[in-house]
């Protein structure tokens, strides 16, 4: 079993910054793609950014140039730096990891989410 725990959310004014972290722990052999998704009230969950094990990245158009995803493979942790935040970035942010467990089975795991609220 694998657990993902997010941290770093909070309340910030428009134009401000936050840094989210997501640490994976448990029966991990390796982690492939890691990513951040978000879900605003009344809306579907959407992709924010993903990063592969080779550090290739992809971003939603709405966050390009403002958000940066990175990872520390030694710590099984993925980060999301959020800059120039806008009220429309308000959402619960979820971490997702494509994990190959020590039994070599492969699963997608999700964290429980961390709230980001941007005031205008």
Image (tube, rainbow, N blue to C red):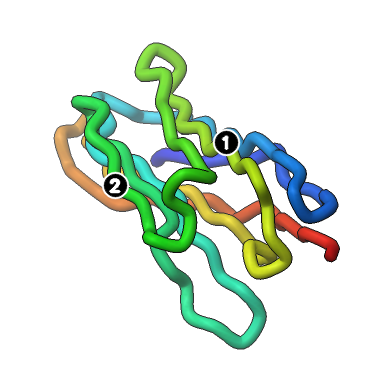
Residue on which the image places disc 2: 58
For this rendering, which residue is in front, 17 or 80? 17
The picture places residue 115, in percent across and down from the top left corner, at 72, 57
Asked if disc 2 and disc 1 are in contact, CB closer than 8 Å, the reply is: no
Is residue 65 at least partly visible in the picture?
yes
The picture places residue 84, in percent across and down from the top left corner, at 66, 47
* Disc sitting over residue 47 in the figure: none
SS type, badge 2: strand
Residue 76 lies, with reference to residue 35, above or below; the image says above
Residue at 74 percent across and 48 percent down: it is 15
Residue at 31 percent across and 38 percent down: it is 51
The picture places residue 108, in percent across and down from the top left corner, at 30, 52
Left or right side of 97 for 39: right
Residue on which the image places disc 1: 81
From the image, which quarter does the N terminus lie in?
Answer: top left
Q: Residues within 10 Å of mark 1 (few under 14, many from 20)?
A: some
Left or right side of 58 for 46: right
Is residue 96 at least partly visible in the picture?
no
Residue 26 lies, with reference to residue 95, above or below; the image says above
Return the residue found at the far top: 74
For this rendering, which residue is in front, 16 or 56? 16
Whole-number angstrom distance, CA of label 2 to CA of label 1: 14 Å
Residue at 38 percent across and 46 percent down: it is 35
For this rendering, which residue is in front, 97 or 57? 57
> In which image quadrant can residue 28 be found?
top left
């Amino acid at each position: 079993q694998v657990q993902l725990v997010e941290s770093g959310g909070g309340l910030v004014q428009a134009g401000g910054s936050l840094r989210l972290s997501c640490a994976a722990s448990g029966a991990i052999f390796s982690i492939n793609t890691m990513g951040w998704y978000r879900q605003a009230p009344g809306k579907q969950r959407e992709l924010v950014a993903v990063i592969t094990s080779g550090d290739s990245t992809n971003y939603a158009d709405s966050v390009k140039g403002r958000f940066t995803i990175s990872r520390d493979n030694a710590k099984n942790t993925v980060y999301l730096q959020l800059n120039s935040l806008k009220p429309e970035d308000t959402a619960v942010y979820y971490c997702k990891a494509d994990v190959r467990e020590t039994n070599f089975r492969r699963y997608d795991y999700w964290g429980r989410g961390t709230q980001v609220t941007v005031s205008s």
